[in-house]
Amino acid sequence: MYEVSSEIYSETDLQQTKCEDGRLISKFQFEYPNDDEISSTKDKDGDFEVKRKRIGVIEIEHSGSTVLKLVGLQVWRGALLLADFLLYNRHNFADKNILEVGAGVGLTSIAAAIFCKNVICTDVDIGGILQLIRKNIDRNRKLLSNDIKVMEYDFKTVEYAPQLANAIEMSDIILAADVIYDDDLTECFVRVIDRIFSTTDSKRTKSIYVTLEKRFVFTLDDLETCAPCYEYFLKIAQPKPWRIEYIPTDFPQYFKYERSKHLILFKITTK
């Protein structure tokens, strides 16, 4: 069966090691944001000291390649872009209730929990992914400001467990990285957004942040290059009562990876 592999494994030195089961452990290095580049103390010559960059590492166990339905077992660029965005907005999000959907192996949720106290990480439990998320959280626990709750959230389900329904209702910030790559799943994701907004009362505002990398193909029908998965999402989202705001991706890059020009980030709210 045809398998795909994330480009970041070959683009960046992740100091990978192999597990006995064939999975990989990668080290995703990042710089802690500095609130002030210049400290208030002076050196012996009377000059203000420049703060040294503080380096951290998130260790993630993941697959090196998978079939399409198991791509959540890998790490993709959108997760790292969203992680950068979270570190950049750490002060705005620190006290928010954060829910990640389609979280894959958990890198973005772990990055969020470095500064944010209330993070829930969810995905559908196929390929042992929830167990893998828990292992990755344990592997990085020393970085976290608080524990991360892990729950199953199947985009295709209709009935929600009470714990998940409460988590959705209480969420302020919803994260989704790299979930738009298959038309059937995209339709399910749009229904998920509908469900999330349907639980919002007048006293609570929800914002959904979505990252993806446009995947371009050349079609004979149109005789041009297009990004069909992304364009299909826009097509079925267009009639919805949502506001889609594109966020410039020129904010600082804290993680080491190739920030492709085809990466996009947008915020969805209700009109």
Image: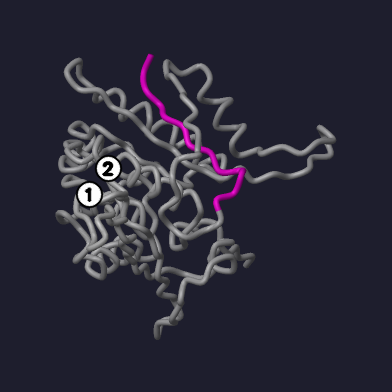
**Disc sitting over residue 253 in the figure:** none
- Segment colored magenta: 259-271
Single out the residue that lies furthest toward the front. Answer: 45
User: With respect to residue 245, does 16 lie above or below?
Assistant: below
Q: Magenta stretch containing residue 123, yes or no?
A: no
The amino acid on which the numbered mark 2 sits, given as a three-letter code, is Arg
Q: Residue at x 40, y 74 (%)?
A: 25
Q: In the rendered image, which residue does mark 2 sit on?
A: 90
- Callout 1 secondary element: loop
Residue 123 locus on image (x, y percent): 34, 51
* In the displayed structure image, the side of residue 146 where residue 231 appears, left or right: right
Q: Residue at x 66, y 38 (%)?
A: 228
**Disc sitting over residue 115 in the figure:** 1
Q: Residues within 10 Å of mark 1 (few under 14, many from 20)?
A: many
* In the displayed structure image, the side of residue 244 where residue 218 appears, left or right: right
Quarter holding the N terminus is bottom right
Q: Earlier in the sequence, mark 1 or mark 2?
A: 2
Number of numbered tags placed on the structure image: 2
Q: In front: 205, or 193? A: 205
Quarter holding the C terminus is top left
Instruction: Tell me which secondary structure the magenta stretch mostly adopts.
Output: strand
